[in-house]
Image (tube, helix red, strand yellow):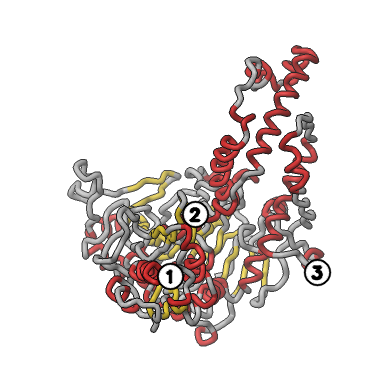
Amino acid sequence: MPPAAKKRKQSAAGGDAPSSSKGKAPAPPPDPATAAAADGSDEDSDYDRASLDDAEDDLEGLVGEVLNGEIDDADAANGASHSAVDVLRSGFDPIVVEDARGEAECDDGHALADAGDAEALMQWLVAPADLDDFMRHTWERRAMYVSRNENKNYYAGLLSKDIIDAWLKAGKMRYGVNVDVTSYVDGTRATHNLNDDGSGGVDPSTNETGVAHAATVWRRFDEEKCSLRVLHPQRWRDPLWKQLAAMETFWKCSTGCNAYLTPPDSQGFSPHFDDIDAFVLQLEGKKLWKVYPPRSESEMLPRYSSPNFEQGEIGEPVLEAVLEPGDLLYMPRGTVHQACCVPGAHSLHVTISTNQFNTWADILELAFPQALQQAVAEVPALRRCPPPDLLDALGVAAAGDDASAAAGSGSSSRREALLGVLTELAGAVMRRLPFDDAADQLGKRLMRQMLPPPASHLSAPKSKSGAEIARTVTDASRVRLMREGAARLALEDGAVAVYHPFSNGRLYHMEGGDEEDEVEGHLDDDDAEKEEDEEPGALFFDPEAGPALELLLLSEDAADDGVVVGDVPLQPETRRTELVKRLVAAGVLAVVR
């Protein structure tokens, strides 16, 4: 249904670029030679705050160009910008797309998810908008609403109220783990995770909540107008599992979802913003959404979700739209929103979430401690004691203009000297930032958080990997990656580590729980050969095995025709075949001949 507030039209082909002020040219990167020369310098550092502000404003253009390339002159003339700040300052106007295609003209999303075609699936999700246009002009910058009045069955088969009912009646859903029962009445949000007979609370002996009774949940839904939040339904619903598994390979970060079932004429949650990029897929009924811009630049693209807001704290919406089956609403991290069900029918939607803790800041957060540790080991000056007067010259009191003036020129110059030393020492740390190691740590985290690959996403039948077939590997065998991108190499403690998602399970996806056995589509072998003390989802090898692992896991042949074991650069033969056997037993490689 078309929105009732201001909107920006876009054609099915992607249309014009979003309006925003023209971005500045990115600042040039620092000269490594100049930076390296500073290690031994004792010159005072004198920074112009205004220059620093300009440089920081230019950073958005710099990261945007790395993501999406340069903005051409025609788009720039229409106001295109890489900057999310520019979009917010110019009004945070949403993109609105009206999809005129009928069901016969649309791709089959289930088929794309089943095949694991990540890019085609993402294009299907945002269609008829162009995926490249979405990434260049919408992602992280503004909300987008796609109305699909001509195809209400766009998401049919993902999830339904009847399926949720069946899960409740089967006793599968525990409060706080699988389902939350919530309400939002007169500005107050409440959670009602307790059965009518008093059960369902936390068991002190196990610290686990109880099973939600279907009769209680539906009574609260029908009589008290409570909403249900179904947590991570992909654990039991294969179409969602396949869709999220494919999206994880597109975004290169963990991707999850929750489902929200709301009774007619009610609201389950307060206004708030989230720390994830949200794709809202309307499955059943209708729901009125109100979308608001981030309240300030400091709340744009947040790394943590907000508390609940009062209505008076969020201003006026930039978009009001009633989502109907087949409709999509995309909201960047930090977009304030609230939604309520319209009279007459319940609403069911799924919110797919991605890009949580997947920022430049997360890479630096991993890199800085390692850089400091290395610099301390290599730069004796960092291990020297500061002078006794450092606490007199530095601090909040010493930084004030009045305090500096009262202290006299001698104290002021001493302060500048100490700040200069700290700046140079910090530079020694900065020049040792291990960005490759930090990227490997992010990759390791991804492998541990990913869903286990569905069987339909694998390059070979599951029977072609595992402990039993691993015992048949010889130099004449040909092996292939079970799934491209499903292995990450890293150097750790003098060993080459291989991290993979084939030991992951579905039940605890997005919860950080332990792996579980016997999950549909999970490559699980109880008798798999593992090194002693080897953690699930990780294999460790001697550094000499590095070139062999690169050929087996990272080469084009590994993902296409496969690699003959005898061609693997590792001697002797027994060592080479043992390495391959371990990768086959873990499910990373398949024996294709």
Q: Residue at x 63, y 74 (%)?
A: 130
Q: Position of residue 424 (x, y in %)?
A: 70, 33
Q: Would residue 203 be seen by someone viewing this image from the given angle? A: yes
The answer to which image quadrant residue 148 occupies is bottom right
Q: Residue at x 72, y 16 (%)?
A: 403
When the figure is inspected, residue 492 is found, relative to residue 66, above or below; the finding is: above
Say which label, 1 or 2, has the lower sequence index.
Answer: 1
Circle 1 crowding by C-alpha within 10 Å: few under 14, some 14–19, many from 20: many
Asked whether 124 or 313 is in front, the reply is 124
Separation of disc 2 and disc 3 at Cα?
46 Å
Left or right? Give the position of 321 relative to 341. right
Separation of disc 3 and disc 1 at Cα?
38 Å
Circle 2 crowding by C-alpha within 10 Å: few under 14, some 14–19, many from 20: some
Q: Which mark is residue 491?
A: 2
Task: Count every numbered label the image shows and give the total.
Answer: 3
Q: Residue at x 51, y 82 (%)?
A: 107
Amino acid found under the numbered disc labelled 3: Ala
Furthest toward the bottom, the residue is: 104
Are dots 3 and 1 in contact, CB under 8 Å?
no
Determine whether the residue tagged by mark 2 lies in a helix, strand or loop. strand
The residue singled out by tag 3 in the image is 74
Are dots 1 and 2 in contact, CB under 8 Å?
no
Q: Position of residue 69 (x, y in %)?
A: 71, 65
The residue singled out by tag 1 in the image is 283
